[in-house]
Image (spheres, grey):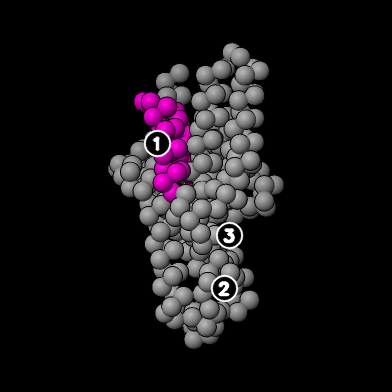
Amino acid sequence: MEAQTKLFENKKIWGLNQTQLKFIAILSMLVDHLVYGIFEVGLYQNIISAANITIGGSYVTGEMMDKIHFYGRIMIGRIAFPLFCFFIVQGFMHTRNRMKYALRLFIFAFISEVPFDLVSSNTIFDPNYQNVFFTLFLGLAALIIIEKFANQPFIRIAGVLLCIFAAKFLRTDYDIFGVILIILMYFVRFNKFQNLMVGMSTRFFYGFYYQMTAFVLMYLYNGERGKGFKYFFYAFYPVHLLLIYFLRMYIAKNPIAIF
């Protein structure tokens, strides 16, 4: 039983601790959102003139955009979300107060909504698309229900389905896929090989082949928490979105050259 007191318990001299994995996740997310907010939303919605960004002395072409999208959002950006799901499962297993943990996610979901909508829709509020904190909150809520009603299968199943379809109804980032991934990772939380198999299965959801990189990183988790920075990681999400929005507004008025 002691072997099950920690998620992915595998203490080694080498490997990645939780803090290192979190920094990898937020760097991946930052690249993803920069490409999305500046190039995809900015250029495609004509918020930024095509003449305002040059790369290597050339204006951004359709072919160049395809490469930026592939390397920035697919190869690098897809690493972040599975790692965030991993942190939700880990937090669920080790937090002293699960309800406070859920409340914290819920509060930051609302704090992040305006910055998220500014980047994704260029408006203060867009009811058609909600930020990833709502997805993570619903995933955590599903895990709480799974354990709390372990001996009441009807309530357990109904509650989990409610969380899954709430993500679809609210149109949260990663919607149903996000909540299901958190649940799957919870059920394989003590087996690294099975977790890799879950990673391989993500290719059937939106064709996210490159999310597999995140599961390889999880395999390298050494069971150590690392240094704190707890609220830094929470605050990074809304703050970096606001900075991307302001950067986009700056580029819309001031041409820039990259490289």
Distance between mark 3 and mark 2 Cα atoms:
23 Å
Residues tagged 1 and 3 counted as in contact (Cβ below 8 A):
no
Q: The residue tagged with tag 3: helix, strand or loop?
A: helix
Q: Earlier in the sequence, mark 1 or mark 3?
A: 3
Q: Is residue 84 magenta?
A: yes
Q: In the image, residue 179 lies at what x, y percent? A: 58, 38
Amino acid beneath label 1: Arg
In this orientation, which residue lies closer to the viewer: 143 or 217?
143
Q: Vertical placement of 209 versus 247: above or below? A: above
**Count of labels shown?**
3
Residue that protrudes farthest toward the right in the picture = 204
Amino acid beneath label 2: Asn
Q: Is residue 119 magenta?
A: no
At label 2, counting other C-alpha atoms closer than 10 Å, the crowd grade (few under 14, some 14-19, many 20 or more) is few
Q: Vertical placement of 239 versus 88: above or below? A: below
Amino acid beneath label 3: Ile
**Magenta-colored span:** 83-112
Distance between mark 1 and mark 3 Cα atoms:
29 Å
Residues tagged 2 and 1 counted as in contact (Cβ below 8 A):
no
Please give the residue where the numbered disc 2 appears in the rendered image: 46
Query: Image point 54% across, 35% down: which residue?
Result: 139
In this orientation, which residue lies closer to the viewer: 114 or 247?
114
Q: Quadrant of the N terminus?
A: top left
Left or right of 98 in this view: 230 = left
Left or right of 207 in this view: 220 = left
Q: Earlier in the sequence, mark 3 or mark 2?
A: 2
Q: The residue tagged with tag 2: helix, strand or loop?
A: loop
Q: Vertical placement of 61 versus 215: above or below? A: below
Query: Image point 51% across, 74% down: which residue?
Result: 48
